Amino acid sequence: MKIPIRCFAAASLALLLVLACAEKQAMFVLLPDLDGNIGTMEVITEGGTQVLSGAEEAVSVTDTELPPTAPTLISPVELLKTFKAVWMARPDEPVHFLLYFRPGTSDLTGDSLGLIGPALASIAEKQSRNISVIGHADTQGSKQTNAALSLKRAERIKALLVDRGINESYIDVTSHGEEDLLIKTGDGVPEPLNRRVEIVVR
Amino acid sequence: MTYLLRFFLLALWVWGPGVVRADDVSEKEIGFIKTLEGPATIERDKKKMPASSGQHIRVNDIIRTGKSATMGIVLKDNTILSVGPKSELAIDEYVYAPKDQKLSMLTRMVRGTLEYISGTIGKLAPQSTRFETPMAILGIRGTRFLVKID
């Protein structure tokens, strides 16, 4: 028996309408960051806003013409059921190493030389192919000198890592001169903690 | 002689841009895929390619995970995105230049599940850190959150 085209078309249209009207839903849950600090979050629809400010607070949106539901606490059991796969996918946090330099040079302090080993161990443990080396300087000297010095420091650390077997293409080098001080000082102030390179291992 | 010249100019035109573009590429890269289980794709400039662990992500890449696939992404500012199965999202804006105090980010998620852990951009410039979904947009004050979109 042949189905007339118009019956097929009507059925398709009906199906499309049903699918288009299928309930869309969204849920948002606030969690503390991995250090335990909790921030806040606003969830904004056409209909209004809800603010989340406590750990495991959740809101849902089913109708964009209404504000999200009032925050309720979501149970750990339900969280695990919904987000287990997400948590299994979570990469480990990047690991940071700070290495310090003698004034005006790209020579590491004695203590800092000892951090190359742990940095290499971290790279191996994470099987990392994504390493950032970021150079800095204190405010002693001109901005231009410090821009060059911070770059030289970063390049020095990269060279040390490459010498110890890390693939050069895994390492990206940036430098911030005296623009990104760890300890805020005035201009022309020697500060050992600002004379640094940060290694980030991802 | 003119033949040789024409050939040379053609060769330059075909291969020249490739040489110049090398630096361009690494600047476009905003992060990478750190973990990947199961099939996933990246759509870039309207072309879909299979995603692979270690692959770099760019602004506007559309990331899609398959039915039982999961993916973990780490961005340059150390934002961590953990993506569940049957999900789709893109980072449509990403500016990370802390030296120039230029920080901003926009994530657009269409469906699926996600854990978002803020990095430097979310912590230093929460007002410029945005997250959009089809039904709601989020204002984030530098923290961690979960999203589920059906």
Image: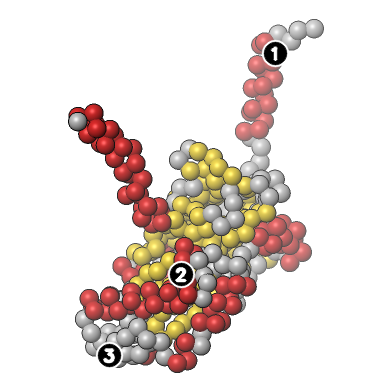
Q: Dots 3 and 2: beta carbons under 8 Å?
A: no
Residue farthest front in this picture: B1
Tell me the quadrant of the picture where the N terminus of chain A can be found.
top right
What whole-number distance in Å separates the C-alpha atoms at marks 1 and 2? 62 Å
Colour basis: secondary structure
Quarter location, residue B84: bottom right
- The amino acid marked with disc number 1 is Cys
- The amino acid marked with disc number 2 is Ser
- Tell me the element at label 2: strand
Give the mark nearest the N terminus, 3 or 1.
1
A86, B50: nearer the viewer: B50
Query: x, y (%) of residue A131?
Result: 49, 68
Q: Is residue A133 visible?
A: yes
The correct choice, above or below, for A19 with respect to B150 in the image is above
- Tell me the element at label 1: helix
Label 2, on which residue?
Answer: A132
Label 3, on which residue?
Answer: A189
- What's the mark number on residue A7? 1
Tell me the quadrant of the picture where the C terminus of chain A can be found.
bottom right
What whole-number distance in Å separates the C-alpha atoms at marks 3 and 1? 83 Å
